Image (cartoon, rainbow, N blue to C red):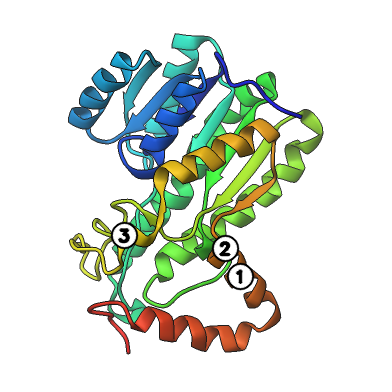
Amino acid sequence: MTVDLKDKVVVITGATSGIGKSCVDIFGRAGAKLVAMGRSEEKLKALKKEWNELGFTIITVRADAAVEEDNRRMIEETVSHYGRLDVLIANAGISMRAMFEDLELDIFRRVMDVNFYGAVYATRFALPHILKSKGSIVAVSSINGHRGIPARTAYTASKFAMEGFYESLRMEVMKRGVHILVVSPGFTGTNIRNIALTADGKSQGESPRDEGKMMTSEAVAKAILRGVKARKRDLVLTTIGKLVIFLNKIIPGPMDKIVYKHMAKEPNSPFK
């Protein structure tokens, strides 16, 4: 089955940077009618001007993924403007990098609120409309949703929670025509590591990894588009990501040591 995205209404959370911004570009070029959600009014205005010049049909919604009422309003504005909703891309997310013993619990909650509850809220309010259109829900998870890594406890927990939530929901709606796709990128060249939260909640600043050697956000967005068109169940991106998940199933103990050693090589690693 191949779905034509022309004139389909697509909501994208976390749309002002990284994978979300690339999804706006890729789905816009595919002819979709777009709703871009982000927290920065300034960025939304600048990007809307850029997207309008490209000929995209788009509205922007200033909202915080972690706030339940903001998600309700985002979906209401979408349906009020376009009269329908076909695809939700739950992409908004933040990361963190700190040892759990040093981490303020408010930071743990903040990561869960954005990554997990943000996806839950958006899905809850979008679902009645997607049931009507027999559309798609896309969850942007991570390889961390399959394999934990040290100093990323909150991020890993949020992605594992996403995986379980959408797996359960998929079974609830699979006989009602709704498609759920869970996408697990590996390390992707975005600003998520630059703004990752440290133990006290401050942004990390400089990324500890070589961003130029990572999968691009554009490549992820193109994979998401293909997955939606083909109504795929799961997408695990990058060969390394697939290998990590495979090895984690058959040799989980040795993988603890392998992953620890790999992550300890990061500059200024909080563990050695």
Name which quarter of the figure residue 210 lies in. bottom left
The image shows a total of numbered marks equal to 3
Please report contact status of discs 2 and 1: CB closer than 8 Å, yes or no.
yes
Residue 259: where, in percent of width, then height? 48, 80
Q: Residues within 10 Å of mark 1 (few under 14, many from 20)?
A: few
Calculate the distance from the C-alpha at mark 3 to the C-alpha at mark 1.
Answer: 20 Å
Quarter in which the N terminus is drawn: top right
- The residue carrying mark 2 is 239
Who is closer to the viewer here, 30 or 60? 30
Residue 78: where, in percent of width, then height? 45, 18
Hey, what amino acid is under mark 3?
Glu
Instruction: State the mark number for residue 243.
Output: 1
Residue found at the far front of this picture: 213
Name which quarter of the figure residue 3 lies in. top right
Disc 2 or 3, which lies upstream in sequence?
3
Secondary structure under badge 1? helix
Residue 130: where, in percent of width, then height? 63, 25
